[in-house]
């Protein structure tokens, strides 16, 4: 049998683990899989879902065996002999003294209040997969039996249900950059002609970046134009179409090939099988990136979408967000049909729409009575966020903040002023905050075998390449048969770090600092990609619910442009910051080319 | 009088009865046994997050680790460097709220 011990140099996660200390390694090799058997009987979790602590019996008040102190913030129990010692450097450390006074093997101790491992010789936190697995398991399935004691039978580290190998599942690669190989290079050279504007008048005639072209309003179609502008400048989507990955001539030929009738150029094929929104997008990308600056009329696209959406029963909306969702669905459906094989949209092995926009949400529902947690994963193409409820309760917070001394470090000035406004970050905090489900929506607990009150928490298990946030500004009430729009201002950052909303972060704040052996996917989700995102498009809505107007702000080469149907104007970023955001598009930072945007275009 | 009569005998390295708890310690024990300490800790955690204290400490830790190099910092180093700054920057309103909670707890419990 191979050793379970984690080799510190294996880069299985982007979180850098400190090199494992020799004392822990020693301890493990001496005690093998039984290393923490003693401790597991002492794991206590209360209340259900609370933090794990180490107590020899449920009501023990741990105190230092040398000085008798029980009020010290750091008390450690030796994992070898269970002696509890205080640790209060630099003045004194009875824990370190204990390790020194004993023969080797008493260096590793566990924080009695946090259930985290500590090496008294290295004076540093240490991590052990098997131990962490036992703690996490105890926290998720803490039983009310025996005064919150965890039965030790379920947490043996050798139990097959918790193989540490789970940690490293196969990697998935979502984004593969494409470079023409030699053969393709020849084909490209022989069959293409350079675009006019590249040689001649780009830059001289207009300072607008490549591909920026107004879209004519075809009669109340700003909801469509605003979304199309965002899609046309979504970096991975643009790269996909501009590198000819969905060729409309090929695609249509295939459709018609099976159909014998060959009215390819007519395009108005009334059969739904012939509608391909990806083809229409391909055509639009060609037109928009042709260098022609006169406003383009997306009539063909509107027509196709109309036919596509007509099947969806709810085509009456003029809501940019619903339009966005239905376009992605449209692209997906077509590809799905062509491949005759169902694809799961979450894992990146799907149509271009899902490869770009699809992420996976994790939802944990925990039974308030026993702590049993049920976890579900759902793919999503965007995240719909509620505006924060009136920040009424914030008076106290504001007062607290004003007392906060600034050390000149960090940007506490900014954070203390800004956080009082409603913000996208605030909405995300709210989205991932544990929420107690009301007694009217009790969930059936598998462990209790009855309906129980529960705590629900959302987190992001896998980030998409492009994150679209939709702010729920339109409130529809089917009961009162009315809708209204919330005009509240919402602050959104140009750079956004999604790390705090990842399942791995959310779980860490729930379980403490651990190596998570119970679900390797949590790690996969966050280490393939950076969690840093850059804003590149904002769709805003001005005016009333039904008589409003959509405008998109695009960020190209770090400069902002306002796309108001046919009119494109360069704008100051303050105008964007002040705008009433309805949908915000963020792209993974590594796919956002600030400086090179211009070069790559010419 | 401690509520230890019902406790099963556990191996204690030191004889409990010889230890005379100070007033402060007996308060601490009351707080722990009643579960109030855990509730106070949770409240404190919440408040420190709300007021930005936690983010500030995180930033300080990050800066220190970056300065020293990731492999040259132990938890003890961090605790030692950050603790004084952390203590000093807890907002007075948070301290006041906790103090009030402890007072009312003591008032409701005879010690
Ligand atoms: Zn001590
Ligand atoms: Zn020991
Ligand atoms: Zn060590
Ligand atoms: Zn197509
Ligand atoms: Zn798809
Ligand atoms: Zn339950």
Image (cartoon, rainbow, N blue to C red):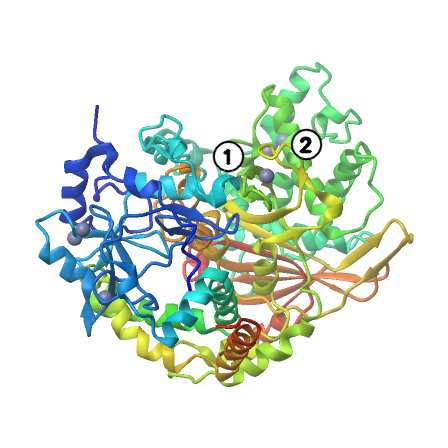
* Coordinates of residue A503 in the picture (x, y in percent): 48, 47
| Residue of label 1 | A347
**Residue at point 78%, 24% (across, down):** A271
Give the position of the C terminus of chain A as an image quadrant. bottom left
Q: Residue at x 50, y 85 (%)?
A: A403
Up-down: is A213 above or below A336?
A: below
Q: Residue at x 56, y 51 (%)?
A: A467
Which of the two residues, A153 or A372, is positioned nearer the viewer here? Answer: A153
Whether the residue carrying mark 2 lies under 8 Å from ligand 4 is answered with yes
Label placed on residue A276: 2
Of residues A288 and B105, the one nearer the viewer is: B105
Does the Cβ of the disc 1 residue fall within 8 Å of ligand 5? no
Q: Which quadrant of the rendered structure holds the N terminus of chain A?
A: top left
Q: Is residue A298 visible?
A: no
| x then y, percent, for residue A87 | 24, 65
Q: Residues within 10 Å of mark 1 (few under 14, many from 20)?
A: some
Q: Residue at x 81, y 67 (%)?
A: A543
Horizontal arrangement in the rendering, residue A451 relative to residue B100 (left or right): right
In the figure, residue A519 lies in which quadrant? top left
| Left or right of residue A502, residue A577 in this image | right
State the count of labels.
2
With respect to residue A334, does A394 lie above or below? below
Q: Position of residue A122 (x, y in %)?
A: 16, 58
Q: Residues within 10 Å of mark 2 (few under 14, many from 20)?
A: many
Q: Earlier in the sequence, mark 2 or mark 1?
A: 2
Residue A73, given in percent of the width and then of the height, sits at 34, 67
């Amino acid at each position: 049998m191979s050793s379970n011990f984690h080799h510190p140099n294996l880069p299985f996660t982007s979180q850098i683990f400190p090199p494992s200390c020799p004392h822990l390694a020693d301890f493990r090799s001496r005690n093998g899989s039984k290393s923490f058997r003693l401790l597991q009987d002492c794991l206590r979790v209360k209340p259900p879902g609370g933090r794990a602590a180490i107590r020899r019996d449920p009501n023990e008040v741990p105190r230092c065996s040398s000085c008798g102190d029980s009020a010290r913030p750091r008390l450690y129990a030796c994992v070898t002999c269970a002696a509890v010692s205080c640790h209060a450097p630099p003045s004194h450390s009875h824990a370190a003294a204990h390790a020194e006074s004993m023969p080797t093997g008493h260096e590793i101790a566990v924080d009695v209040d946090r259930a985290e491992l500590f090496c008294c010789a290295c004076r540093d936190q240490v991590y052990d997969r098997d131990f962490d697995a036992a703690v996490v398991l105890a926290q998720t399935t803490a039983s009310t039996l025996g005064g919150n004691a965890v039965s030790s039978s379920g947490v043996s580290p050798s139990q097959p249900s918790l193989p540490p190998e789970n940690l490293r599942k196969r990697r998935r690669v979502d984004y593969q950059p494409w470079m023409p190989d030699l053969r393709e290079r020849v084909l490209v050279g022989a069959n293409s002609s350079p675009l006019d504007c590249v040689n001649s008048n780009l830059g001289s005639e207009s300072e607008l970046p490549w591909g920026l072209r107004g879209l004519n309003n075809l009669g109340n179609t700003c909801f469509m134009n605003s979304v199309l502008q965002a899609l046309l400048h979504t970096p991975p989507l643009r790269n996909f179409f501009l590198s000819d990955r969905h060729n409309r001539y090929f695609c249509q030929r295939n459709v018609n090939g099976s159909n014998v009738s060959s009215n390819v150029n007519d395009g108005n094929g009334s059969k739904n099988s012939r509608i391909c929104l990806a083809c229409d997008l391909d055509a639009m990308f060609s037109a928009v990136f042709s260098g022609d600056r006169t406003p383009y009329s997306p009539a063909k696209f509107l027509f196709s979408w109309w036919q596509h959406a007509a099947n969806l029963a709810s085509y009456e909306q003029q809501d940019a967000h619903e339009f966005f969702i239905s376009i992605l669905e449209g692209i997906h459906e077509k590809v799905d049909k062509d491949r005759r094989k169902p694809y799961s949209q979450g894992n990146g092995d799907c149509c271009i729409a899902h490869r770009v926009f699809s992420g996976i949400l994790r939802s944990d529902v925990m039974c308030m009575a026993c702590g049993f947690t049920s976890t579900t994963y759902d793919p999503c193409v965007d995240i719909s966020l509620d505006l924060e409820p009136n920040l009424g309760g914030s008076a106290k917070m504001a007062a607290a903040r004003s007392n906060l001394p600034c050390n000149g470090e960090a940007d506490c000035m900014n954070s203390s002023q800004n956080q009082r406004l409603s913000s996208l970050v605030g909405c995300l905090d709210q989205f991932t905050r544990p929420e107690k489900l009301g007694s009217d929506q009790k969930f059936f607990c598998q462990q209790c075998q009855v309906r129980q009150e529960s705590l629900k928490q959302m987190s992001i298990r896998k980030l998409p390449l492009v994150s679209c946030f939709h702010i729920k500004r339109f409130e529809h009430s089917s009961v009162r048969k009315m809708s209204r729009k919330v005009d509240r201002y919402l602050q959104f950052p140009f750079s956004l770090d999604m790390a705090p909303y990842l399942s791995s972060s959310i779980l860490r704040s729930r379980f403490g600092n651990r190596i998570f052996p119970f679900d390797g996917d949590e790690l996969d989700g966050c280490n393939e990609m950076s969690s840093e995102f850059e804003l590149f498009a904002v769709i805003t809505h001005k005016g009333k619910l039904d008589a409003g107007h959509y405008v998109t702000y695009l960020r190209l080469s770090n400069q902002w442009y306002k796309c108001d149907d046919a009119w494109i104007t360069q704008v100051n970023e303050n105008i964007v910051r002040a705008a009433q955001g309805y949908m915000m598009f963020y792209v993974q930072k590594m796919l956002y080319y600030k400086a090179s945007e211009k070069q790559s275009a010419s | 009088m401690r509520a230890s009569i019902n406790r099963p005998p556990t191996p204690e390295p030191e004889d409990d009865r010889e230890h005379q708890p100070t007033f402060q310690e007996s308060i601490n024990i009351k707080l722990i046994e009643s579960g109030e300490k855990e509730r106070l800790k949770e409240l404190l955690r919440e408040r420190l997050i709300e007021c930005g204290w936690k983010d500030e400490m995180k930033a300080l830790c990050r800066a220190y680790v970056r300065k020293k190099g990731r492999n040259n910092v132990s938890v003890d180093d961090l605790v030692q460097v950050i603790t004084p700054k952390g203590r000093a920057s807890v907002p007075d309103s948070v301290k006041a709220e906790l103090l009030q909670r402890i007072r009312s707890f003591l008032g409701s419990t005879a010690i």
